[in-house]
Image (tube, rainbow, N blue to C red):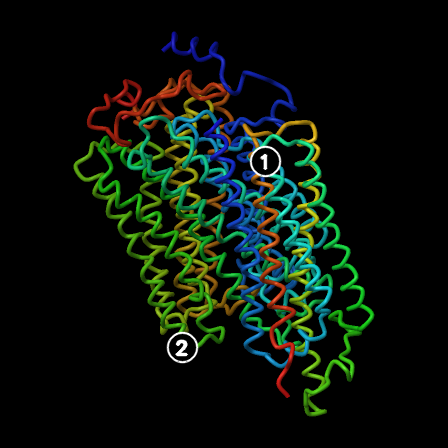
């Protein structure tokens, strides 16, 4: 161990090659940009989380006593906008994706390194604008910006928030563009399409959604901005405008955006599960193609957000049926992960605990999604806490679990250090318990009829709301813990070695942390992606189990 | 080098796909409103200045030709010719913007800008019979046409301005001798962008100016 430690400390890598502020702010190294993104999205995660805690505190009692109704409207709006646009959407693609895509395919960097840096700057400009908007009054339209409230009635800073999300959209588009071109053009010799890691497949599918979906939300919000700023009348009912058109355009992006959040997390789980089961992934091609299928079907189901908004019964039927279709590729993934674990030698290390959490919570979130896609039931539970619970099971239980699992899995590669395993397992357990305590009561609340977006409620709902608020504080502890021990491990963590998990990916073949150009020489790929039958188990892992 | 060239042009094509979706949102809105309010859109269409619109179409088609010729000149190592053609392209682009500016000024004078002072004159309404009590609503709905007109031509003009800026750089780099038969990828990608912006106009022109100009009475 001692010799590895010395070796790791002395070797040149992307972290110690250059020092100083400008070596970070002007870097074109995809790994450094990934860390810039990591710091920025963590900031926004805690800002958004603060709003969530304030929402939960207000809902501790039935009376609207902590904040005024107007303030409450702003709280849930900014919680949604910051979490969706500034945390969840860039989360895995911009951090782990940026870090891993070139390494996993054996490339030196992304196809357009400078555009990669540009996309971070666009994100920072958008984020600054958003924070300015938050600090000088905020927005109260809900994250959905529904017209005509957002265009004609709201007195809050809709223009600023709209522009922030518009600019942020370009950051997503450029990231997606970079990934697609990189995967097409920069694969190492022998890295054929059917040898690509599944994380690459899901990132690729995500990038396609970035490219085709994001411009639509960009133009939609821009038209809202034009309507407020220049008095144009595109969605204004007084001038014959159609608010439903806004909803169609909005959800055309914002439904696929859900798959932007969940697909990369699925990719992470597809990496973790075979590694900690020591088995080749079951049904590689099915998992890969189900990512593409989710991206394609995702564009065909948007109007299931509008069943009670006044669309025709005929189109509601079609969209309902198409929404069920998404369950097929999703189930393919869940069954294949489960089959991968079957008769594998499963290790319950931290990343695997998150992967377990993901599979369970995503399944609950996905199945309740089918409830909502059913026309009859949707009439009953639409705009209730049932919907809130459903999408938090996908976005927090799914996407954030996947993000944390991925952070733990690749932290040794990113930092060259091991995090304390016992703390990791504890935090994973706390997150799982806190999450379920927060959101499971909301399913029941919603089914009983508690509507979303109200700051007060009848007293009979209080017990479940208290449970939910209590859960959210536990969840907060679970999120702060990894922050603390990751930071701790940077200085005090044990050196990780090149491949602490005995994982099969190309990113583990190079040193930890990697050099600026990832590989000393371009790797030549001769094996399939998850060849765990022929991978020896490294000593560290066998000691940990 | 070959790999970089392929990466750059694939990137450009993907970017144009996103641009297509971006304008697509507005084309979708146009389609739905045109279907819902055919008479209002007809009235709007025929108030647009056809000679100026047609002239602008011609100007843009010429600019696309000069772009294509500039790339050809680069391939044939004729640097001066290439620079001249690139300059010509920018002149066409700026001409387009100036003409567009005159059109917008005309809209302002005629009170055709959506908002409180929007007004359709008796001449605008010639040949269209609307009940006096519905006149207010009719005028309101016609604003939807002008809103789309300004949003679509405005964003198109913004793309033209970006294009001129882009070509300013390409001309400078070309004049410095960076492009020749061996390497002209930036020129090609800039050209792709320019052609795309042209094609958007080729669709905008008939949709906004030509359909239903001779409104049935």
Q: Residues within 10 Å of mark 2 (few under 14, many from 20)?
A: few
Q: Chain of mark 2?
A: A
At x 69%, y 55%, the residue is B59
Q: Residue A446's quadrant in the figure?
A: bottom left
Residue A252 visible in rendering: yes
Q: Secondary structure at mark 2?
A: helix
In this rendering, which labeled residue sits more in front, label 2 or label 1?
1
Q: Is residue A239 left or right of residue A301?
A: right
Q: Quadrant of the N terminus of chain A?
A: top left
Q: How many marks?
A: 2
Q: Position of residue A394 (x, y in %)?
A: 40, 52
| A225 is higher (above) or lower (below) than A167 | below
Q: Secondary structure at mark 1?
A: helix
According to the picture, the residue beneath numbered tag 1 turns out to be B186
Residue A66 visible in rendering: no
Q: Position of residue A17 (x, y in %)?
A: 55, 16
According to the picture, the residue beneath numbered tag 2 turns out to be A313
Q: Position of residue B27 (x, y in %)?
A: 56, 64
């Amino acid at each position: 161990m001692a010799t590895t430690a010395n070796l790791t400390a002395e070797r040149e890598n992307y972290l110690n090659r250059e020092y100083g502020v400008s070596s970070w702010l002007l870097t074109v190294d995809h790994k450094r940009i990934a860390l810039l993104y990591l710091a920025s999205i963590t900031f926004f995660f805690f800002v958004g989380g603060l709003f969530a805690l304030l929402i939960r505190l207000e809902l501790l009692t039935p009376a609207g006593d902590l904040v005024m109704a107007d303030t409450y409207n702003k709280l849930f709006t900014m919680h949604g906008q910051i979490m969706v646009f500034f945390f969840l959407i860039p989360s895995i693609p911009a951090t782990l994706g940026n870090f891993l895509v070139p390494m996993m395919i054996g490339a030196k960097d992304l196809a357009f390194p400078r555009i990669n840096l540009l996309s971070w700057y666009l994100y920072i400009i958008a984020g600054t604008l958003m924070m300015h908007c938050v600090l000088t009054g905020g927005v109260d339209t809900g994250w959905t910006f529904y017209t005509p409230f957002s265009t004609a009635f709201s007195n809050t800073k809709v223009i600023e928030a709209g522009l922030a999300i518009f600019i942020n959209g370009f950051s997503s588009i450029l990231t997606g563009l970079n990934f697609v071109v990189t995967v097409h053009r920069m694969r190492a010799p022998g890295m054929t399409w059917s040898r690509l890691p599944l994380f690459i497949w899901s990132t690729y599918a995500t990038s396609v959604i970035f490219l085709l979906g994001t411009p639509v939300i960009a133009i939609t919000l821009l038209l809202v901005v034009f309507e407020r700023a220049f008095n144009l009348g595109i969605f204004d009912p007084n001038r014959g405008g159609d608010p439903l058109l806004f909803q169609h355009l909005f959800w055309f992006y914002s439904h696929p955006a859900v798959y932007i959040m969940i697909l990369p997390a699925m990719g992470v789980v597809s990496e973790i599960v075979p590694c900690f089961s020591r088995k080749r992934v079951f049904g590689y091609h099915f998992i890969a193609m189900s990512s593409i299928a989710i991206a394609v079907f995702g564009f065909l189901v948007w109007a299931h957000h509008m069943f009670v908004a006044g669309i025709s019964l005929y189109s509601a039927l079609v969209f309902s049926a198409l929404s069920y279709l998404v369950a097929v590729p999703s189930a393919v993934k869940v069954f294949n992960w489960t089959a991968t674990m079957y008769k594998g030698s499963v290790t319950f290390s931290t990343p695997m605990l998150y992967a377990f959490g993901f599979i369970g919570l995503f399944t609950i979130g996905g199945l309740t999604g089918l409830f909502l896609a059913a026309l009859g039931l949707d009439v009953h539970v639409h705009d209730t806490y049932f919907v809130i619970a459903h999408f938090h099971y996908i976005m927090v239980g799914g996407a954030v679990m996947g993000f944390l699992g991925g952070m733990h899995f690749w932290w040794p590669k990113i930092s060259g250090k091991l995090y304390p395993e016992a703390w990791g397992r504890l935090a994973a357990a706390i997150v799982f318990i806190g999450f379920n305590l927060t959101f499971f009561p909301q399913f029941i609340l919603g089914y009983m009829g508690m509507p979303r977006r109200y700051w007060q409620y009848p007293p009979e709902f209080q017990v479940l709301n208290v449970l939910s608020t209590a859960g959210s504080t536990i969840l907060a502890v679970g999120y702060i813990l990894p922050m603390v021990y990751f930071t701790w491990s940077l200085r005090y963590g044990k050196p990780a070695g090149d491949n602490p998990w005995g994982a099969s990916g190309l990113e583990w073949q190079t040193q930890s942390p990697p050099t600026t150009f990832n590989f000393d020489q371009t790797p030549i790929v001769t094996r399939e992606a998850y060849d765990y039958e022929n991978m020896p188990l490294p000593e560290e892992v066998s000691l940990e189990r | 080098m070959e790999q970089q060239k392929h990466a750059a042009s694939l990137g450009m094509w993907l970017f144009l796909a996103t641009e297509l979706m971006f304008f697509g949102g507005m084309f979708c809105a146009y389609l739905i409103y045109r279907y819902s309010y055919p008479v209002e859109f007809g009235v709007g269409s025929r108030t647009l200045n056809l000679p100026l619109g047609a002239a602008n179409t011609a100007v843009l088609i010429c600019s696309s030709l000069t772009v294509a010729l500039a790339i050809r000149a680069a391939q044939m190592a004729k640097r001066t010719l290439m620079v001249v053609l690139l300059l010509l392209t920018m002149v066409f682009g700026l001409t387009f913007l100036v003409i567009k500016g005159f059109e917008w000024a005309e809209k302002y004078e005629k009170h055709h800008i959506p908002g409180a002072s929007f007004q359709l004159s008796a001449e605008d309404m010639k040949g269209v019979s609307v009940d006096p009590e519905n006149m207010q609503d009719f005028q309101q709905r016609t604003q939807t046409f002008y809103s789309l007109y300004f949003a679509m031509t405005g964003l198109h003009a913004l793309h033209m301005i970006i294009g001129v800026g882009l070509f300013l750089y390409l001309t400078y780099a070309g004049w410095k001798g960076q492009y020749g038969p061996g390497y002209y990828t930036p020129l090609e990608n800039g050209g792709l962008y320019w052609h795309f912006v042209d094609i958007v106009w080729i669709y905008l022109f008939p949709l906004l100016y030509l359909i239903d100009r001779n409104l049935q009475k």
